[in-house]
């Protein structure tokens, strides 16, 4: 068994493997705009940022991961509309109770590839190959596909407000269960301020927003919990929109059926096709994509019979739109993921909108937690 002193050499071997696979080494800035990170990753990550400001007072943060600065650099370059493959190895910074705030991260980002399922399969296969550099023991692969849930919500013809709500709920089991009950029978949920919400329901959005803002102003309320009056007004309008339109209980049962599917990716696809056919829902595009990806993974030597697929599996940020996966230590020595990633087209959509670019940039990638890999491989 080697010592932790040998781990940096393994990290360099990983970097060499990624370079040989055609992923150019990226070196993005250490400091990035804090508001960009908050907008893209949500509150959970935002609370863990190391913050500072530049000479003009603009709030900045040390990069909490590589994905955002690598994607930003690509989109701001002359190659923004082209396919590109990037790799990285270096420090990232997050508040981690009981652990150093600075740690090393390696990873890959595959941008602009129109052959989405082939790109997905390449990233998963390379993730496994990289993990094998460190760990000789068993590796467990957990996989899901957020795109199936998104396709289900579209097929059910939900209101935009309810679609947004359930997408946010996807990684939060208790909230999802409560909202599905509310959708099945809206009368079982009487929210606070029901009178005001009923008055706002169906109203002209601009007039309703002005009404709520004026009411808060009359009451002398400028902010609540750091939220402005405008933010609070938006929240009221969202709640009013959620008050209208439920689903028949049998449709909610279909959602629950879909989200309960587990097994290897091939059997999961078969189960999902049967559910969709029985419910007369068109999920064919999402399930055809799953089938293509399964075939391409098998071609790359991934044993799908050992992969644990779950339609309810997600990761800890909201920007994933398709494949999500994690590679775990099968020996149980390390509890947290060794490698994790997925398809994040939503993140690139948000970033191109911020930059004023009229581009669609498909994106998939993964990060290697090299300090965990070293422990899993007995080299810590």
Image (cartoon, rainbow, N blue to C red):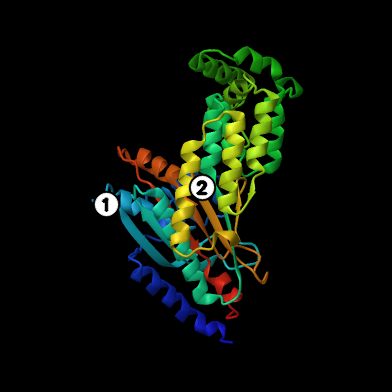
Residue 52 visible in the shown view = no
Residue placed most toward the observer, 245 or 72: 245
Q: If you read the primary sequence from the N terminus, does the residue marked by circle 2 or circle 1 appear first?
A: 2
Q: Residue at x 74, y 22 (%)?
A: 190
Give the x, y percent position of residue 100.
Answer: 58, 68
Relative to 177, say whether 208 is above or below. above
Residue at the far right in the pictured view: 188
Q: Is residue 8 above or below residue 236?
A: below
Residue topped by disc 1: 77
- Residue receiving disc 2: 41
- Count of labels in the image: 2
Density class for disc 1 (Cα within 10 Å; few <14, some 14-19, many ≥20) is: few
Q: Quadrant of the C terminus?
A: bottom right
Q: Residue at x 49, y 40 (%)?
A: 286
**In the image shown, does 242 or 35 lie closer to the viewer?**
242
Q: Could you tell me which secondary element the residue under label 1 belongs to?
A: loop
Above-or-below relation of 161 to 34: above
């Amino acid at each position: 068994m080697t010592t932790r002193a040998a781990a940096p050499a393994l990290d360099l071997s990983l970097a060499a493997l990624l370079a040989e696979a055609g992923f150019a080494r990226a070196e993005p800035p250490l400091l990035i705009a804090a508001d960009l990170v908050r907008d893209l990753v949500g509150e959970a990550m935002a609370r863990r940022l190391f913050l500072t400001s530049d000479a003009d007072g603009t709030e900045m943060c040390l990069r909490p991961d590589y994905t955002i600065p690598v994607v930003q650099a690509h989109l701001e370059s002359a190659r923004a509309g082209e396919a590109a493959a990037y790799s990285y190895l270096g420090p990232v910074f997050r508040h981690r109770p009981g652990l150093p705030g600075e740690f090393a991260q390696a990873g890959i980002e595959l941008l602009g590839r129109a052959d989405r399922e082939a790109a997905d399969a390449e990233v998963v296969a390379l993730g496994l190959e990289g993990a094998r550099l460190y760990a000789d023991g068993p590796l467990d692969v957990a996989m899901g596909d957020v795109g199936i849930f998104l396709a289900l919500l579209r097929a059910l013809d939900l209101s935009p407000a309810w679609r947004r709500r359930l997408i946010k709920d996807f990684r939060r089991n208790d909230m999802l269960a409560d909202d599905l009950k509310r959708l099945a029978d809206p009368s079982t949920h009487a929210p606070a301020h029901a009178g005001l919400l009923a008055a706002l329901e169906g109203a002209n959005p601009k007039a309703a927003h002005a009404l709520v803002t004026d009411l808060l102003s009359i009451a002398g309320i400028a902010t609540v919990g750091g939220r402005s009056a405008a933010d609070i007004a938006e929240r009221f309008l969202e709640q009013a929109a959620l008050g209208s339109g439920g689903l028949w209980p049998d449709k909610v049962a279909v959602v629950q059926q879909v989200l309960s599917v587990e097994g290897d990716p091939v059997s999961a696809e078969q189960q999902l096709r049967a559910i969709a056919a029985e419910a007369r829902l068109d999920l064919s595009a999402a399930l055809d994509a799953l089938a293509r990806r399964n075939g391409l993974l098998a071609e790359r030597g991934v044993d799908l019979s050992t992969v644990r697929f779950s339609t309810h599996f997600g990761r800890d940020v909201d920007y994933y739109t398709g494949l999500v996966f994690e590679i775990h230590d099968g020996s149980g020595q390390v509890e947290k993921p060794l490698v994790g990633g997925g398809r994040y087209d939503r993140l690139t959509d948000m970033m191109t909108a911020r930059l004023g670019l009229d581009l669609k940039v498909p994106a998939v990638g993964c990060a290697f937690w090299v300090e965990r890999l070293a422990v899993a491989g007995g080299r810590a």
